[in-house]
Amino acid sequence: MRKVCLFLASYVLAFSTVSAQQPATPPNPADDTGGKRILWVIPNFRTSPTLNPYVPIAPKEKFKIASQDSFDRGTIALAAAFAGQSMLSNSNRSFGEGVPGYAKYFGAAYGDFVIGNYMTEGVFPTLLHQDPRYFRRGKGKGLARLGYATSRIFVTVHDSGRLEPNYSELLGNSAAVAISMAYYRENRDVGDAVSKLGGQLAVDMASNVIKEFWPDLSRKFSKKHN
């Protein structure tokens, strides 16, 4: 998912740079989130069309979002693809080769997705009373929206409606990386953990950018197709 998100984010960045020179767009419809999947693969269940008016969600809804993201067919397909890529690059030699080796790569890749989703969308948002959703800005110039999207890994909404540091993102991903050290035998030192955490934060930032601009891109694709 990391490479997919970064590739799409680079495309969105080019789109937002062009959009920055255009007049501000009107607010999007209330249900404008770009669908449940981006490019029919990447899960998009945690996106909300707007922040105002803010309506908090219960803990069970937070865990529901985590479950939807974790057990979606798109997540399974992405884990399978990344397992294949990791196996080809022989990133964890202890996993071995052949079908048994691929099974271990797949289990590790899928475990990364599931653990990360539950930590950042369910466990820590519930403990810290924070909202795990991404609230689209959906209007304004491209660069302003780009800055808003990238900042959301550092800023989130408390269940009371106030803005505060996104502890759920930072602590949740840190916990997920710590847990993953148990099954990545060859990547257990501090340097590997810090690198993996930085990579995950970068992916989540790119994912927010994609979620912000995907409905606009989707409409453009639809108009060209029609």
Image (tube, rainbow, N blue to C red):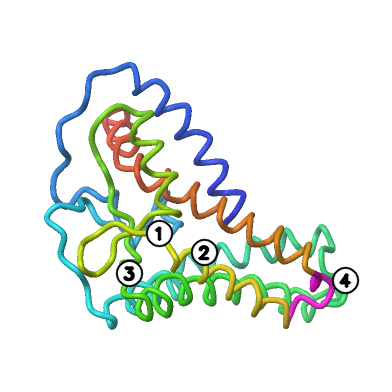
Residue 139 % position (x, y): 23, 35
Viewer-side label of 4, 3:
3
The residue wearing badge 2 is 170
Q: CA distance from mark 2 to mark 4?
A: 29 Å
Q: Upstream in the sequence, badge 2 or badge 1?
A: 1
Residue 115 % position (x, y): 54, 77
Q: Is residue 14 depicted above or below 65 in this figure?
A: above
Q: CA distance from mark 4 to mark 1?
A: 39 Å
Q: Quadrant of residue 200?
A: bottom right
- Tell me which secondary structure the magenta stretch mostly adopts: loop
Q: Amino acid at mark 3?
A: Gln
Q: Pointer 4 and pointer 3: residues touching (CB < 8 Å)?
A: no
Q: Amino acid at mark 1?
A: Pro
188 within the magenta span? yes
The residue wearing badge 3 is 130
Q: Characterize the local packing of mark 2: few (<14), some (14-19) or many (20 or more) Cα atoms within 10 angstroms.
A: some
Q: CA distance from mark 1 to mark 3?
A: 10 Å
Viewer-side label of 1, 3:
1
Q: Pointer 2 and pointer 4: residues touching (CB < 8 Å)?
A: no
Q: Tell me where the magenta segment starts and ends, as one range.
A: 183-189
Q: Which label was assigned to residue 165?
A: 1
Q: Upstream in the sequence, badge 2 or badge 3?
A: 3
The residue wearing badge 4 is 93
